[in-house]
Image (cartoon, rainbow, N blue to C red):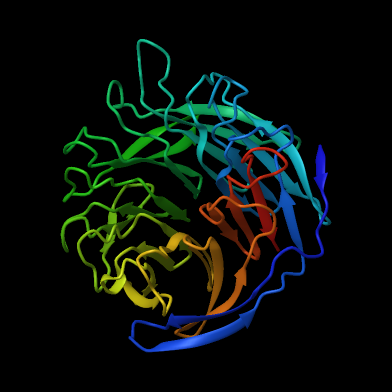
Amino acid sequence: MKRHKRMASGWVGILTVGVLLGISATAITAQAQCTPAQVEQLVATGGQGFDDFGRAMAVSGDWAVIASARDDDNGTDSGSATMFHFDGAQWVEDVKLLAPDGSAGDEFGSAVAIDGDLVVVGAWKDQGIAPVHTRGSVYAFRNDGTSWNFEGRIAASDGSGIVQDFGIAVGLGNGRIVVGAPGDNTIYSSSAGSVYSYVYNGGIWGAEVKISPADGSVAHYFGESLAVAGGTVLIGARGDDEVASDAGAVYLYTTDTGQLIAKLQASDGVANDGFGRQLALSGNTAVVYGKNYGGTSGGAIYVFDYAGGLWSESGKIVESFASSSYNFGWGVAVSGDKVLVRESYKSKVYLFGRSGAQWSEQGTLVPTGTGYGLYGARLAFSGDTALVGDQRWNNGGVKSGAVLFLI
């Protein structure tokens, strides 16, 4: 095991930035300071250049899983995922997970999720074992109190010979594994997309439930992004055309029966918004990225809350200096009433908090070291633990990746 000691400093958090609060058009300027008490900078032991450590991340309690989707242990770009454990004083590197049947090009670690003692890892380019080519798979691992053990491989039952991208997004909740397959065309047409849900019973992952929207169509990419909270899954369809061409939408379904709960769209959605490309879910709060806020392409985060038996848009977070080059929201995570938002042009991550109906900036998380413009492209947030990835960070080598922990 490799131990990663805490760093006393390393994040700078003072910035003046304008935001819009609620769903009004009133801009305010918030000045806040973020000085995390404990910060850690982690890298994978033995990591190599272009491993993409931090390509996907998830955290639950004292455990975190961080993927290196282009690790070469099972062949070029076969992928891996590393488990870290917080022992009360520091994060400890525990074990590297590999697909038992992994091979070159699988990209095991394209997506990860963790819930308690269960971890799921997507391998969206896995081709399966000839003659059955499944076009993507996911792998389950469970902790028995001592170690993490392989529990099973899952592939779509109807995926043979079809380009599905099964495993490009994964989620866990209420004992179910939920898997996105945005390239699925078994029900509608090319890249309409589907989502699959599985439960563990009798020693296997089965009882497959397939979720496809009744209004699905070509190039909606339903399932390219998803998030799970309890028995609810939030699913993005960035190519949905109901509001306008490629304006996008998100759907909420039950994970056990696949019943539609709601379809949500931006109140001011426009063509090419790509609403739903990035999203997150925590309890009764959903946050969703939309690109073309106000026609500027600067981006915005739309907040939806469940109250009175309905999901409805309750707020919006944007930068007052929104510009087509900023892509504010190209990376988002939520935990309770706190939201992490990435602004890709300057590779910054903002922390926003909500008090009542008001959202305000709480700080800016600025990385140390040499970055390559992907800082914050992957975010994870649970309780008071946040993971901010930069799989192109220069860790004494060539773009080997790093992750910062804020606790």
The tally of labels here is 0
Quarter of the figure that contains the N terminus: top right
Horizontal arrangement in the rendering, residue 223 relative to residue 351 (left or right)? left
Quarter of the figure that contains the C terminus: bottom right
Tell me residue 157's x, y (percent). 33, 26
At 47% across and 24% down in the image, what residue appears? 105
Tell me residue 99's x, y (percent). 56, 25
At 42% across and 19% down in the image, what residue appears? 128
Q: Is residue 306 visible?
A: yes
Q: Is residue 203 visible?
A: no
At 25% across and 58% down in the image, what residue appears? 248
Horizontal arrangement in the rendering, residue 87 relative to residue 61 (left or right)? right
| Position above or below: 51 against 301 | above
Q: Nearer the viewer, residue 395 or 282?
A: 395
At 74% across and 63% down in the image, what residue appears? 10
Tell me residue 55's x, y (percent). 54, 43
Tell me residue 223's x, y (percent). 34, 46
Give the quadrant of residue 329: bottom left
Give the quadrant of residue 13: bottom right
Q: Nearer the viewer, residue 332 or 114?
A: 332
Horizontal arrangement in the rendering, residue 362 relative to residue 341 (left or right)? right
Q: Nearer the viewer, residue 222 or 399?
A: 399
